[in-house]
DNA sequence: CGAATCTTTGAATCCTCTCAAGTCTTGTGG
DNA sequence: CCACAAGACTTGAGAGGATTCAAAGATTCG
């Protein structure tokens, strides 16, 4: 309904320098886990580190896919714009995962979706030529690439099966549990939730319906306010929401 | 709710002989479009042609992924089983497309979903070693593989964006238009629709709701019965359903 | 032919949407 | 630094959809 002006420019990110793969804390979990850093030093030097503020766009659907992004910290959404102008989130990209894999297909490829940061997000920008270069000189790297693509398919399926199936209460609880999972990994006691609009685009309902469910969760003390958009959570309670009604 | 006994065995398909890639009418549209048939003759000889009757299972979620399937004729669904025993279709696999791509990851991989024929379906069964063999001796084949994986992601996104978004009327109309598209390609005047259960697993609603919408379409002459599960269609009318309410 | 399965339809209930107003936040300029 | 405007979130009420439970037609298959 609110016809969004979707072809706005991408926000300029903050450049944080060249990537330092050798000392990267998440490298062993990502696509470069098995590559020989010294052998490909020249190529890996072309990777830059950027910081995208919450709500800023990394790339826009239909623009030339000149490279892909590895999320080091934060959270991205990939959203498709529908014919009527509304958006639907088709995948979330978490730490260690990739956005814009379609850039690997060939040089003329365009991005399939628009990528937007849901939190302040740190990414490595990997030009097409880097992956392609490693691939040609190191055929075994192929397996790593496929593993990442497989992860993309799993992320898509998760949106469908977990966030778009069941009652709205269940879907919202599953989204929150995903955020809680991330927080637990980082030993944080609270989660930073996305706006109702994003919640809606992920679960396939209206903003108002999401707001009602989240209000209900707050009333039931499943969520407790702890700053702007920050909440303490009752993990067991949310888990029981997911399990209820499913028998 | 109806807890399906999901680990039933796969149906035995009808073996139709060795694949004859050289004379295959759809090869130029699939993963082998660019391979040198003579160079890889020994490997390609390991591909068998099978015919799976409607409703039969090609493979089951969690079983060892020893190879993948190319659809030559017909239609497959890939469905994930949810915690409560219900199924949700995460992808449809059409002519020229692949099922079971996860088998390429490594030898111990298991299938992520269960593959079932929605129509009588002819497939080529391609063992893991065939793709892997071509990949090692022919690095350029890599691009073809990625193209197929990209197609898988698109198919997943289509289920989410087209079949699980909008009013139920719109979703059902979009499923029908997809079937019509297939029929038009083959110059057929009618479509063979899937059962209400599958329609429901694809659109994320109940069987009854689907039945009501399809009955409405029949009353409005958007569909006209033409045999068992076969219907003549009013393409323009269905298209206007998709466009309605979306402004 | 008859049993099992699938589909259709009805009626009541529950859920989500829409429209609308009111509240809270955020960001900007004086 | 405050005030104001724009945007985001909450809440209510009524309408429209989808679900559930139930029962009656169709189909399919042995």
Image: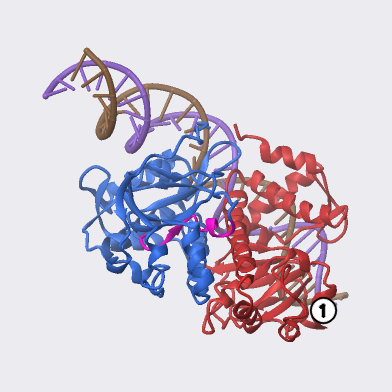
Chain colours: A blue, B red, C brown, D purple
Residue range highlighted in magenta: A95-106
- Among the 4 quarters of the image, the one containing residue A180: bottom left
Q: Is residue A188 above or below residue B174?
A: below
Q: Is residue B209 left or right of residue A135?
A: right
Locate residue A124, reporting x and y percent: 37, 56
Mark 1 lies on a secondary structure that is: loop
- Front one among C22 and A38: A38
Locate residue B112, reporting x and y percent: 54, 73
Q: Is residue C13 left or right of residue A120?
A: right
The quarter of the image holding the N terminus of chain B is bottom right
The residue at the point 71 percent across, 84 percent down is: B43
Looking at the image, which residue sits at the far front? A42
- Front one among B222 and A4: A4
Residue neighbourhood size for the residue with mark 1, other residues' Cα within 10 Å, grouped as few (<14), some (14–19), many (≥20):
some
The residue at the point 72 percent across, 75 percent down is: B56
Locate residue B196, reporting x and y percent: 69, 59
Locate residue A181, reporting x and y percent: 32, 63
Tally of numbered discs: 1
Q: Is residue A130 above or below residue D30?
A: above
* Residue B42 in view, yes or no: yes
The quarter of the image holding the C terminus of chain B is top right
Q: Mark 1 points at which residue?
A: B20
* Residue A243 in view, yes or no: no
- Among the 4 quarters of the image, the one containing residue B191: bottom right
């Amino acid at each position: 309904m609110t016809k969004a002006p979707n072809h706005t420019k991408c926000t300029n990110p903050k450049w944080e320098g060249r990537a330092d793969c050798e000392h990267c804390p998440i490298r062993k979990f990502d696509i470069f886990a098995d590559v020989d850093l010294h052998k490909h030093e020249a190529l890996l030097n072309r990777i830059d580190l950027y910081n995208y503020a919450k709500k800023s766009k990394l790339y826009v659907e239909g623009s030339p896919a000149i490279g892909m992004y590895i999320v080091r910290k934060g959270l991205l959404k990939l959203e498709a714009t529908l014919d009527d102008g509304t958006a639907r989130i088709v995948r979330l990209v978490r730490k260690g995962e990739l956005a814009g894999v379609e850039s690997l297909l060939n040089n003329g490829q365009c991005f399939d979706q628009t990528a937007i940061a849901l939190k302040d997000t740190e990414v490595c920008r990997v030009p097409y030529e880097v992956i392609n270069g490693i691939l040609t000189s190191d055929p075994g790297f192929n397996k790593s690439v496929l593993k990442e693509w497989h992860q993309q398919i799993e992320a898509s399926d998760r949106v469908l099966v977990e966030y778009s199936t069941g009652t709205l209460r269940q879907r919202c609880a599953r989204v929150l549990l995903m955020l809680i999972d991330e927080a637990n990994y980082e030993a944080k006691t609270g989660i930073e939730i996305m706006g109702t609009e994003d919640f809606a685009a992920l679960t396939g309902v209206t903003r108002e319906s999401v707001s009602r469910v989240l209000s209900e969760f707050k009333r039931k003390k499943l969520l407790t306010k702890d700053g702007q958009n920050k909440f303490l959570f009752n993990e067991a309670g949310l888990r029981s929401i997911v399990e209820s009604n499913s028998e």
